């Protein structure tokens, strides 16, 4: 028994190897993980919370910032958790909106606070941390505002129609433009995010007080005014004490798009909705076809894009998957008409799907998808015909009216109902044919099921409670959440090939694992899912807005995701609370991959009851990152805005949507609220394995693995190690784009180790190769993973800051000496200045160590460097 001295104790979170060597040179060891300890109570952190109790001269436009000693459980935010009121009138609460971060939140009052007034805010004990521990006690702090508003600025203006008359009740939204996703200070940008709303008065005038800064101002016409259209949003910069005036003239509907929607034989389509979208103003207009299939749509000046879709897609006998047609009107107030006709494809084949249990009893609320691709056969992100979705009725049946072709039919029932999803079926439909098939869902106890389990860790080796999903190539699906120590397990059908993945928001950043393909045959399977950071930018904070339900409500997240609720859409009286929570914890399924941030959108009425069905259509805006799509190999033409159907547990296409490629958003009209995201057909085919894999002894406590990377369908490599032949073992390198890896962690002298090197493509699919190469370790190794520094190098001091090009200092020299010891940098370049040669050498070090080769020394790289420096 021994106690490790400093600096080895106390240890930081991570995966460690402890080895012991006796006097005869015989070694043994064990690997273990350290997770973050829960130290002290879950409470408000007064040192980071502002304004502090007793503060004076607080700006009237100040935000209330509350931070905690540990990360929050987002589910505890659904109940009332915060109050702000004048100290003298505690029951008169100040309304406002929230931005929620992993370990705190900001409250922005809807209106400017009064000068020279005393206010008190209270954090209620309804909040819990991620372990479910409630706040120890309520926290209150009082402060006094400054005697003037000179620290704020004002945005004011007037909204008129094209005829110059005032527009009363126009909705004005003022917000900070979304930050650039790759910006180094995006976390601070999110914390500076600002969004406020107001309405024009009887004279069409508006005024709103804001902190100094740069803003975007947009105006929505009053709900129900079809004669006026949105104006182009305006940018404005406001200094302290300054009033900036921005006037808006709303467009008039003097332009007309007309035409007909017909079947190929010339007969009219009477159940079509024709919609037009203007990217410049993000205005949507729509109308319906008449008995002759004709339509007349009033729009405004400028460029519009027009398309059609069935008013009730679940019952329509036709589909339209064509490209939007453009129309360009002169930018003036003169009347103008442009004709656009549409021809749609007749769907004259019927498919009736019956969902039953193993005894033939019908199953209601089963989800059924008819797809033109098998869930396991898609080899790239396809831009073809989207899948059709139906839900079975009380008779257990779902009816599709489809075109003549081959379809793959999959059925889904949420796992909590105790069924195993039916096997995917292939069906060929001829023109005019009606065909019936049955999907049989068996109870788990009636099916041969096995355990699929393992652990989830982030790339630093820290276990996390990630969301885990698995889907089989025969139609099965299951999901669960790993425990606090990363362990997960669920029952899956035997004799099937399963794709397993995981997602987690960790310290505000999105982490996901590649999907591992495993064959579950006659015995249970254990896998290790290593989650890597998906972007350099954190997820935007959750946003919460409380407004009267009788008026139009706009809630907008910092990345541009937005929900616009018409008056009385959710409730006719009382305040409603709108929450938008960005997340990465959502499943991939057969044929469907999530390629954007997922937005969990909820609305609660004044009684706290969740509202999921809306009385009027709302508009939701879903942003996407074009650069991230390119990285995944997805084109904008392949994007499918979707919602997650809670009844069946499946992603479903949103019909009434427009992809705005100029603004990189999907704009959709919805009549229900759930989780929303942009999806694409999933590339489900794993890449080929790396070639020419070798492993050999490379020094004391070191084994070198080399290989040749793929030329196509390749993103990076994962390296697994096991002490037992035939077992995949643990992940030693999670994300490496080099063609070599030096393993120097946890090796025991004289032990044979077996390595599997797998490719991962841009869609996150992992190759399925099981062949291993092996080598015997000569000498034991400790925590270092890429060797040890040269004995001649004199290295002292740990690196505690992020190092990047252009910096100087002793810590830069320490980094350079490590790189010299690795043979990546010459000794005469260890000058203490971080230049281009150091950057290039560091990228090589990171690639060899299984880290992202970014060329600067962040936390994960510093951890490796400091281990080598000891």
Image (cartoon, rainbow, N blue to C red):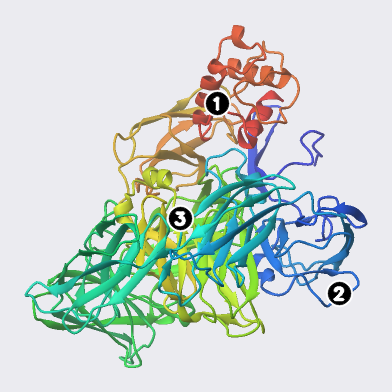
Kindly indicate whether the residue at mark 1 contacts the one at mark 2 (C-beta within 8 angstroms). Answer: no
Picture residue at 57% right of the left edge, 63% below the top: 172
- Of residues 840 and 319, the one nearer the viewer is 319
Which mark identifies residue 778?
Answer: 1
Q: Which residue is mark 3?
A: 232
* x, y percent for residue 325: 23, 59
Picture residue at 65% right of the left edge, 60% below the top: 484
Note whether residue 73 is visible: yes
Name the quadrant of the N terminus: top right
**Distance between the alpha carbons at the discs numbered 2 and 3:** 41 Å
- Of residues 515 and 240, the one nearer the viewer is 240
Viewer-nearest of labels 3 and 1? 3
Provide the secondary structure element on which disc 3 rests.
loop
Neighbourhood count class around disc 3 (C-alpha, 10 Å): few under 14, some 14–19, many 20 upward = some
Q: Which residue is mark 2?
A: 90
User: Going by the picture, which residue comes out furthest to the right?
Assistant: 54
- Decide: is 540 above or below 418: above
Note whether residue 762 is visible: no
* x, y percent for residue 696: 45, 26
């Amino acid at each position: 028994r021994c106690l490790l001295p400093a600096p080895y104790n106390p240890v930081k979170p991570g995966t460690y190897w402890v080895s012991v060597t006796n006097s005869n040179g015989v070694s043994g060891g064990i690997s273990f993980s350290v997770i973050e300890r829960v130290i002290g109570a879950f409470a408000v952190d007064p040192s980071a919370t502002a304004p502090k109790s007793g503060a004076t001269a607080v700006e009237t436009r100040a935000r209330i910032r509350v931070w905690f000693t540990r990360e929050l459980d987002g589910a505890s935010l659904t109940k009332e958790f915060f109050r702000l009121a004048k100290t003298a009138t505690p029951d008169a609460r100040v309304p406002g909106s929230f931005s929620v971060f992993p370990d705190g939140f900001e409250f922005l009052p809807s209106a400017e606070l009064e000068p020279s007034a005393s206010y008190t805010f209270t954090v209620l004990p309804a909040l819990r941390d991620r372990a479910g521990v409630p706040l120890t006690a309520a926290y209150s702090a009082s402060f006094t505002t400054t005697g003037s508003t000179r620290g704020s600025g004002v945005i004011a203006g007037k909204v008129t129609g094209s005829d110059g008359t005032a527009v009363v009740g126009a909705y004005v939204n003022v917000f900070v433009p979304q930050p650039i996703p790759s910006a180094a200070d995006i976390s601070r940008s999110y914390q500076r995010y600002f969004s406020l709303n107001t309405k024009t008065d009887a004279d069409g005038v508006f005024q709103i007080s804001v902190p100094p800064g740069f803003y975007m101002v947009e105006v929505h016409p009053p709900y129900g005014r079809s004669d006026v259209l949105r104006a182009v949003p305006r940018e404005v910069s406001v200094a302290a004490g300054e009033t900036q005036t921005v006037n808006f003239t709303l467009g008039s509907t003097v332009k007309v798009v007309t035409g007909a929607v017909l079947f190929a034989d010339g007969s009219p389509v009477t159940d079509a909705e024709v919609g037009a979208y203007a990217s410049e103003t993000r205005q949507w207009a729509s109308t319906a076809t008449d008995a002759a299939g004709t339509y007349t749509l009033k729009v405004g000046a400028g460029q519009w894009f027009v398309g059609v879709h069935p008013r009730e897609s679940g019952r329509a006998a036709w589909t339209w998957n064509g490209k939007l047609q453009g129309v360009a009107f002169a930018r003036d107030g003169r009347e103008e008409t442009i004709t656009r006709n549409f021809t749609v494809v007749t769907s004259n084949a019927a498919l009736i799907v019956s969902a039953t249990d193993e005894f033939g009893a019908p199953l209601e609320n089963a989800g059924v998808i008819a797809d033109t691709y098998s869930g396991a056969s898609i080899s790239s992100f396809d831009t073809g015909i989207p899948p059709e979705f139906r839900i079975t009725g009380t008779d257990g049946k779902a009816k599709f009216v489809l075109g003549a072709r081959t379809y793959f039919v999959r059925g889904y029932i949420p796992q909590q109902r105790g069924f195993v999803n039916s096997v995917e079926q292939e069906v060929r439909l001829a023109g005019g044919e009606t065909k019936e098939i049955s999907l049989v869902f068996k109870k788990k106890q009636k099916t041969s099921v096995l355990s699929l389990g393992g652990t989830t860790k982030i790339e630093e080796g820290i276990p996390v409670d990630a969301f885990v999903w698995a889907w089989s190539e025969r139609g099965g699906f299951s999901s669960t959440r790993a425990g606090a120590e990363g362990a997960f397990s669920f029952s899956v059908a035997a004799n099937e090939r399963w794709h397993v993945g995981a997602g987690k928001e960790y310290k505000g950043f999105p982490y996901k694992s590649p999907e591992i393909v495993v064959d579950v045959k006659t015995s249970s399977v254990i896998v290790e899912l290593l989650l890597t950071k998906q972007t350099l930018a954190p997820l935007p904070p959750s946003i919460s807005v409380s407004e009267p339900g009788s008026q139009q409500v706009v809630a907008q997240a910092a990345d541009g995701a937005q929900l616009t609720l018409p008056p009385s859409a959710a409730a006719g009286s009382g305040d409603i609370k709108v929450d938008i929570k960005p997340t990465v914890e959502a499943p991939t399924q057969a044929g469907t991959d999530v390629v954007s941030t997922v937005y969990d959108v909820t609305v609660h009425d004044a009684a706290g009851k969740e509202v999921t069905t809306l009385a009027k259509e709302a508009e939701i805006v879903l942003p996407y990152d074009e650069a991230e799509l390119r990285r995944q190999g997805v084109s904008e033409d392949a994007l499918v805005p979707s919602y997650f159907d809670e009844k069946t547990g499946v992603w479903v296409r949103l019909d009434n949507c427009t992809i705005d490629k100029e603004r990189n958003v999907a704009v959709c009209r919805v009549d229900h609220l759930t989780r929303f995201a942009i999806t694409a057909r999933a590339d489900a085919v794993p890449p080929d394995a790396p070639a020419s894999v070798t492993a050999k002894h490379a020094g004391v406590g070191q084994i070198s693995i080399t290989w040749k990377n793929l030329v196509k369908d390749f993103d990076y490599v994962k390296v697994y190690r096991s002490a037992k032949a035939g077992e995949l073992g643990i992940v030693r390198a999670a994300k490496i784009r080099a063609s070599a890896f030096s393993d120097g962690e946890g090796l025991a002298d004289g032990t044979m180790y077996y390595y599997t090197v797998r490719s991962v493509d841009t869609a996150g699919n992992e190759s399925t190769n099981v062949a291993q190469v092996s080598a015997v370790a000569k000498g034991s190794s400790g925590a270092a993973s890429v060797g040890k520094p040269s004995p001649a190098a004199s290295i002292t001091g740990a690196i505690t800051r992020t190092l990047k090009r252009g910096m100087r200092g002793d810590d830069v020299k320490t980094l350079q000496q490590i790189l010299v010891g690795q043979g990546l940098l010459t000794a005469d370049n260890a000058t203490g200045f971080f230049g281009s040669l150091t950057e290039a050498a560091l990228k090589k070090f990171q690639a060899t160590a299984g880290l992202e080769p970014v060329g600067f020394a962040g936390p994960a790289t510093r951890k490796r460097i400091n281990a080598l420096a000891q």
